[in-house]
Image: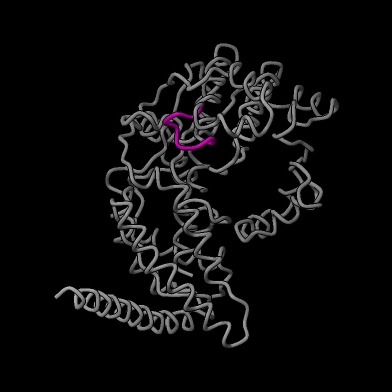
Amino acid sequence: MRTKKNKTPEERFEELFNYACFDRLKSTNANSLKKVCLINGDCQQPLLGLSDQDVDILLKETTCVIHAAANVKFDQSLKEATYNVRATRDLLELAKRMKKLKVFVFVSTAYSNCLNDHIKEDFYEPPMKTENLFSVVNALDDQTLVDVTPQLLKNWPNTYIFGKSISEDVVNAASEVVPVTIVRPAIVTSTILEPMPGWIDNFYGVIGIVAGAALGIIISNCVLAAAWKRGTSDGTTTIYNYVGDTRTCQTWQKFMEIVIPNCWSAASEKLLWYYCFDIRENKTWNNICVFFMHTVPAYVVDFILICFGKPTIAVKSYRRLNKMLDLISYFSTRSWVFDNDNVMGLWNHMNEEDNRSFFFSMEKVDCNEYARASCMGARLHLLKDTPDTISKGERKIKIMFVLHYTVIALLWYLLYKFVALILGFFF
């Protein structure tokens, strides 16, 4: 763990375990936190920023490595994305020297090979070889690198995915001497059961978008199961595409159908405007709708706030939301076919007790209950709305509903009058 925002690793650790998801652990086994041994490091630094003393400890004591640390910003520079690749390479070099190592799990992304419509649980040819990437980044100054990035990315959607694909190739190259396995989760969502239903701590992914518009422990279980399987067998490297089952809410349309009703019962008292979710395939039409349904209402809200002498927040919030939607638009407007036979095989390989303790079967998820828990979880853990404000949120969303459609009707009326005025000059 690294120092961040003037907080030491120890301070960040204490803050981390104050999250609500650890409440049950602290109440049943508070001493378990003492088992955590912090090591000061930074994945953005060469050799992970580790001291020689800490390296010695890792080489002597480590039995399992789960590499999930990364800069996950989609709009990061290519140089920043290269740090993720370098960290993977450096950690694998350490793993080669770990005397007790049983397994190395690399947490990638289901979209690491998104240029393929059908993504198998196999390795793919990377967009660039690792050495070539490092050579380019080291040879060019920052501005020149920014200028040539589009030519290097070609059809790849962003530098994060570009780097993940190359990182998988790094893992593949080390698989001959390191017992590796790869887990490729899809988009980030809130927890299903453990440590509590609906818990989430960041605005990345679909739940964050819903929370923003409405103003992953299950993955961890799959990672742990994959580590157990590889660490207790002499098998070959296995890749797990951990994605939605065809019977679960794996499409935007299905997701909307079950989430929208739950948003009413989990409405936030911080609501800025009435929410609505629409799927549009035409970008021009989408931009028009964004203008009338995001930009105009945002300025209306901020104008009202100014009249009451309060700080403006709507325009800034909608800009942030629109930026997030733009960043994920590549993924939200396309479809892929994912093989997940290895995930299904892993689930079936476990006994019933382990299935209960480390639940990760997508096909057994109750989507309606999950949607309810996710909306409530976003309300509580992201928007920080306490349960006693639910009734206030419900009242506010009803008011916003009326205001929303009143403004929409007014805009259509003004558009009608404008068109009639223009046509009046010609007829």
Q: Left or right of 340: which side holds 125?
A: right
Question: Residue furthest toward the top?
Answer: 176
Q: Is residue 120 above or below residue 201?
A: above
From the top left corner, tell me how far across and down residue 209 is, in percent: 46, 58
Image-quadrant location for residue 295: bottom left
From the top left corner, tell me how far across and down residue 112 is, in percent: 46, 31
Q: Is residue 198 above or below residue 33?
A: below
Q: Is residue 295 above or below residue 356?
A: below
From the top left corner, tell me how far across and down residue 280 is, in percent: 29, 55
Question: Residue furthest toward the bottom?
Answer: 308
Residue occupying the point 28% across, 75% down: 415
Give the residues drawn in magenta, as a range: 152-160
From the top left corner, tell me how far across and down residue 402 is, in percent: 35, 83
Choose between 289 and 362: the one closer to the eye: 289
How many marks do you count on the picture?
0
Question: Residue furthest toward the front?
Answer: 426
Query: Is 269 part of what is drawn in magenta?
Result: no
Residue occupying the point 74% across, 26% down: 47
Residue occupying the point 39% across, 40% down: 243
Q: Left or right of 107: which side holds 337?
A: left
Question: Residue furthest toward the left?
Answer: 427
Residue occupying the point 59% across, 41% down: 76
